[in-house]
Amino acid sequence: MASFAGAYAASHGPLLVREWESVPAEQKSRLASAFRSLGERITESRADVLIVVSPDHWSNFFLDNYPAVCIGVGATHEGPPEPWMKSYPHRELAGSPEFALHLVEEAMRAGFEPSMSHRLKLDHGACIPLWRMELPNMPALVPMLVNSIEPPMPSLARCYAWGRLLRQAIDSFPGSERIGVLATGGLSHSIGEKTMGAIHEDFDRETIRRFSASASSLLEYLEAELPRRGNGSEEVRNWLVAHGAAAGRGFELVDYLPVPAVIVGCGFASWLTSGSG
Ligand SMILES: [Fe+2]
């Protein structure tokens, strides 16, 4: 049977690439170390497959058709379409159609009904963390695009439940692969709205604290706070998927720092993998 290779989370944001040179040296070094530390953990986990949980920043979908959740079942995915991501080293990334289809089937059986795509573009949401983590070998990627951009969005409880479902799909996959989960997005940021640029450090720190408390306390806090913490903060949904995959246990903060130069409260975390799910 396949095995769970851990869950990981990292922030993303276009300015981590576009404004990298204007990030103060000390923050730049902490960001680089945090991304690299996650990369090392993933390498040590010997993950053959990574489910990358990210929003779609209107790279594949638009308002005429924006799925709540879409799973990429293709043998390959396209690299990032953003012109400012042209230095990203991969124009094509390998998928894992066997596991991805198993995941979709498990989801359908459990009444989750995701959309699926045989050809997705992986935008900066997935590719900035993958790039900065400096993985010596890129695992096969199964993109899971969760709408954390355009209301109405999947509920927080549903995102956590999706994580539990991912774990069930990993545990029931009849292969020998090691399969991990990488969530990207958050923590607080605000894009293209009146509060653009605001970082809510108090919210970020309390959210981080509650990842080590009960899932109900975390969800309750986020339900109450997310509506006034900037639209980008909604991407914490993806962290909830990772948290669910880890059964709500083992959260470990790698680093957190608010970075005004990239207008994101940048968080990095992993979930310990020992024990059963
Ligand atoms: Fe984003």
Image (cartoon, rainbow, N blue to C red):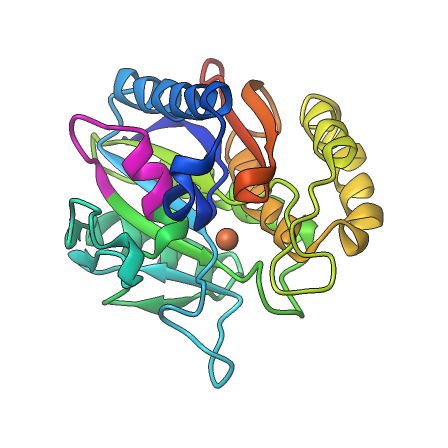
Task: State the residue at coordinates (30%, 68%).
Answer: 117
Image location (x, y in percent) of residue 252: 56, 17
Q: Foreground residue, 156 or 196?
A: 196
184 versus 40 height, above or below: below
In the rendered image, which quarter is residue 201 located in? top right
Task: State the residue at coordinates (26%, 45%).
Answer: 141
Image location (x, y in percent) of residue 162: 54, 49
Image quadrant holding the N terminus, namely: top left
208 versus 77 height, above or below: above
Judge left or right: residue 209 versus residue 129: right
> Is residue 99 visible in this depiction of the protein?
yes
Judge left or right: residue 171 versus residue 254: left
105 versus 89 height, above or below: below
Image location (x, y in percent) of residue 220: 82, 42
Task: State the residue at coordinates (63%, 47%).
Answer: 189
In the rendered image, which quarter is residue 121 located in? bottom left
72 versus 218 height, above or below: below
Which residue ends up furthest to the bottom in the rendered image?
64
> Is residue 171 visible in this depiction of the protein?
no
- 49 in the magenta segment: no
Image location (x, y in percent) of residue 54: 45, 51
Q: Foreground residue, 174 or 137?
A: 137
Task: State the residue at coordinates (17%, 50%).
Answer: 93
Q: Which residues are magenta?
A: 127-140
- 137 in the magenta segment: yes
Which residue ends up furthest to the right in the rendered image?
224
Number of numbered labels in the structure image? 0
